[in-house]
Image: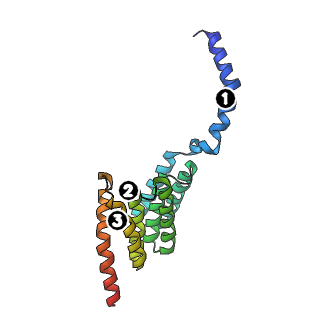
Amino acid sequence: MTKSKWNKLVVILYAFVLPIALPILLSSRFNTFRFNVTQLIEHLNAGNQAYINKDYATAETQYKAALKEAEKRSPENAFAVDALHHLGVTYIEANRYYDAEATFQRQVAVAEKVYGPESQDMLSPLLDLIRLCIEQRKFSEASELNRRALSIVGRGVDQKHSADAELVRTMSEEIQSKQEQNSVR
């Protein structure tokens, strides 16, 4: 390509294409350019390290920062589901069950939008909420959520979700056992 043809191409690009494309690329529909996956992973890793060290306040801060970074991509995405999981588990460890419940409910709602309400990817968020309900002795709610998870498992699961499917199956027994123990007391 000669220099004059290259110059014409650059002029066309700057004069016609860029003024049209740039606003579109920077609009909210394409806000993934403001999303930084490296920062998100750094926040998750820092949160994980703080969680391991039982520094739940720092873990909470880091997981909230990861969630904020994930939401730059879009309000509902798989990164947000993951950040909400970690945040909810941290709240449980800090004995903040009300916050954990709200976080896990939000995780389920976001996961439904991301994956669809009947997707195998719903098993992990549902299990988080089921475990919390059992811990809080909300057995009827746990049982209802577990029935939903069992219906997903009943349609078949792939290898990636087999461990979650096995947990769902054993949760029915655990819920029943805990209910019986609770009624004896």
Q: Are marks 1 and 2 in contact (CB under 8 Å)?
A: no
Q: Looking at the rendered structure, which numbered label has been put on residue 120? A: 2
Query: How far across and down, in percent of the image, does residue 105 sit?
Result: 49, 66
Q: Nearer the viewer, mark 1 or mark 2?
A: 2
Residue tagged 1: 18
Question: Does residue 160 appear left or right of residue 113 in this picture?
Answer: left
Helix, strand or loop for disc 1:
helix
Q: Earlier in the sequence, mark 3 or mark 1?
A: 1
The residue under the point 33% across, 55% down is 161
Q: Are marks 3 and 2 in contact (CB under 8 Å)?
A: no
Position of 41 relative to 171 (above/below): above
Position of 85 relative to 72 (above/below): below
Whole-number angstrom distance, CA of label 3 to CA of label 2: 10 Å
Q: What amino acid is labelled 2 in the image?
A: Gln
Residue tagged 3: 150
Q: Is residue 47 visible?
A: yes
Whole-number angstrom distance, CA of label 3 to CA of label 1: 52 Å
Q: What amino acid is labelled 1 in the image?
A: Leu
Q: Quadrant of residue 19?
A: top right
Q: Nearer the viewer, mark 3 or mark 1?
A: 3
Q: Is residue 55 visible?
A: no
Q: What amino acid is labelled 3 in the image?
A: Leu
Which of these two is toward me, 117 or 127?
A: 117
The residue under the point 39% across, 66% down is 148
Query: How far across and down, in percent of the image, does residue 95 sit?
Result: 45, 75
